[in-house]
Image (cartoon, helix red, strand yellow):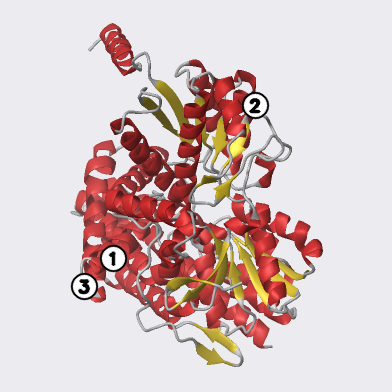
Amino acid sequence: MSELLQFLFSGLTVGAVYALVALGFTIIYNASDVVNFAQGEFVMLGGMLTVFAYAAGLPLILAAIVAIIVTAAVGVALNKLAIEPARGAPVVSLIIITIGASIFLRGVAQVLFGKQIHRFPSFSGDTPFRIGGATILPQSLWVIAGGLAVFYALYLFFTKTLTGKAVLATSNNRLAAQLVGINTNWVMTLSFALSAGIGALAGVLVTPITNTSYDVGIALALKGFAAAMLGGMGNPKGALVGGILLGIIEAMTAGYLSSQYKDAAAFVVILLVLFIMPQGLFGAKQTERV
Amino acid sequence: MTIRTLMTTAAALSALAAPAMADINIGASLAETGPAAFLGDPEAKTLRMEVDKINAAGGINGEQINLIIYDDGGDANKAKTFATRLVEDDEVVAVIGGTTTGPTMAMIPVFEDAEIPFISLAGAVEIIEPVNPWVFKTPHTDRMACEKIFADMKAQGFSKVGMISGSDGFGKSMQAQCKGVAEAAGVEIVADEVYGPQDADMTPQLTNIKGSGAEAILNSGMGQGPAVVTRNHTQLAIDAPLYQSHGVASKQFIELAGTEAAEGVRLPAAALLVADQLADDNPQKPVVQGYRDEYEAETGEDVSTFGGHAYDALYILKAAIEKAGSTEPAAIRDALEQTTGFVGTAGEVNYTPEDHLGLTLDAFEMLEIKDGEWTIVAE
């Protein structure tokens, strides 16, 4: 019994990491239908900048805030310098631009920060909580709480605020949105800033668990993307549930079947779900007008 | 600029870059970037630093070394291309490199055909078994690490071992070697778990090992995985002691795992990490202290054993060229094979026609982490 609980805690820990990364995909996707493959690099930047600001003597909380603001600025720059000039290009081209941006950011990070692996201390120590014979680290709870907070904030943003609705309107029909007075360029800039900020926050929260290095973004983005697809791209609820589900499937496979097949099992489940529900678990059904 | 001017410029540039005549061309293909960058980066830095030093002191036999380093990113295909380029365009007389086993194995046929001596910096035992006349290596093999660890476990009275391995090249290779030598070493592998190199949590695997009755746990892996395993080992309060491999032998590992979690972890490693703790009559002491001080002053980074492998390779090669008194690849190869009593960062190297590794188990020190520092375990 304590084993099952331990596997569950492990799944929650890993799943919350995936969910946080997946949540970062939602805003840009909602604003422009673009899957931002540089999202993993935002997570990396959040972690790395915190590491270096913290090492430079800033208190951890301040270092984290600096990292989030700088990363958000990088997001804005990415939009202004690479996405906006390509306005009018098909979504696929924009996605390819984000892949290029991710390679660029990784290269810059490699030169700027070096190739070593880094970590900063957990927020509330490393003494695990013991529950029913199983253990979970305080940092895991931080990640889970962070995931829930971001989810709730996004939910409020998209349903209760005018700006959030403007983001959705821009994605639905850019021309119509402009006609009703929405500044779509501003919406795009905002969505990149927010996505980058959420990515950086994810980086800050998960680094004490996952460690960070210049190339950590690839693996995180892949799993986060898979989680977002599983839950339904663009839906914050989908990102949260998809991430946690993916983490738990991996942990249960590693625990009860074989750790060899843990990643394979997770991707088989994703394939099955997408086979039956192509929009993911919570994705909106899309109708294409012909 | 037209294509023609571009091409002319390129041709002019390449003419400028061509080495002056009487230089000794030594090639290297290392993983300066990519997943193995934390190995390849200190290797490349070490080679550049030491070659500058040798050249400033007058070179080898009065000739300057012209070092040509390519960055293969740990990719076997790229490494093979660079190997061909080193042989055909750069006309090197010897090559150092192959940061990891994959690129090394891909390059071997090229150098074998061209009859160029090649000193690999990768770990796996396949590189020198069976012996290829043109191929040497400097790092300890993973099989030696397994034997050293199992010997220490037996000495402590543990015979049931739980293994947890990374699914990357290093982890897999060592996992296979350890399973191969377990029986001869008198230990039984009671659990055999794996994890992905980027995984964030290994508690399910460790929970299963805990339930398997293992008396000691061996983690074969490098990079960040072992740090996570070490933290999870402490989190689950597992009584069975944790052994790491030589793949984590850098200060960074203790930082990543945290001083508290790393307490009591044992691993086999080269004397480089504990330079100051070596006995004063240990012939390795001045060598490793000298290299460590120089590297740390030059780069501002902590020294790792990986850069030490490159240091050893370069100085073994230097000694061989001096001894051969010639820069003919065949003469260098013959001199390399006669290397005896070379004291490097990895230990005392004695190459023979049957042994192109030249290290014994004594070259490993068994270390234990205490209060965030390496300490030598008394045998």
Q: Which residue is mark 3?
A: A62
Label 3 is placed on what type of residue?
Leu
How far apart are labels 2 and 1 at the CA level? 46 Å
Q: Which residue is mark 1?
A: A50
Residue type at tag 1: Thr
Circle 1 sits in a helix, a strand or a loop, which is it? Answer: helix
- Quarter of the image with the N terminus of chain B is top left
Same chain check for tags 2 and 3: no
Q: Chain of mark 1?
A: A
Quadrant in which residue B289 is drawn: bottom left
Q: Could you say which disc has been placed on residue B232 in the image?
A: none
CA–CA distance in space, label 2 to label 3: 54 Å
Rendered image quadrant of residue A7: bottom right
- Image mark 3: chain: A
The subunit letter for the residue under badge 2 reads: B
Q: Position of residue A218 (x, y in %)?
A: 45, 52
Front residue of this view, candidates A159 and B303: B303
Q: Is residue A10 left or right of residue B322?
A: right
Residue A221 visible in the displayed image:
no
Which one is earlier in the sequence, the residue at label 3 or at label 1? 1
Rendering coords of residue B338 (x, y %): 61, 34
Q: Give the structural element (helix, strand or loop) at label 2.
A: helix
Badge 2 crowding class, 10 Å Cα cut-off, few under 14, some 14 to 19, many 20 or more, is some
- Look at 53% across and 78% down and name the residue there: B264
Q: Is residue A24 left or right of residue A187?
A: right
Asked whether the residues under the numbered discs 2 and 3 touch, taking CB atoms below 8 Å apart as contact, a structural biologist would say no
Position of A135 compared to A94: left or right?
Answer: right
| Residue B315, above or below B278 | above
Question: Which residue is denoted by mark 2 in the rendering?
Answer: B109
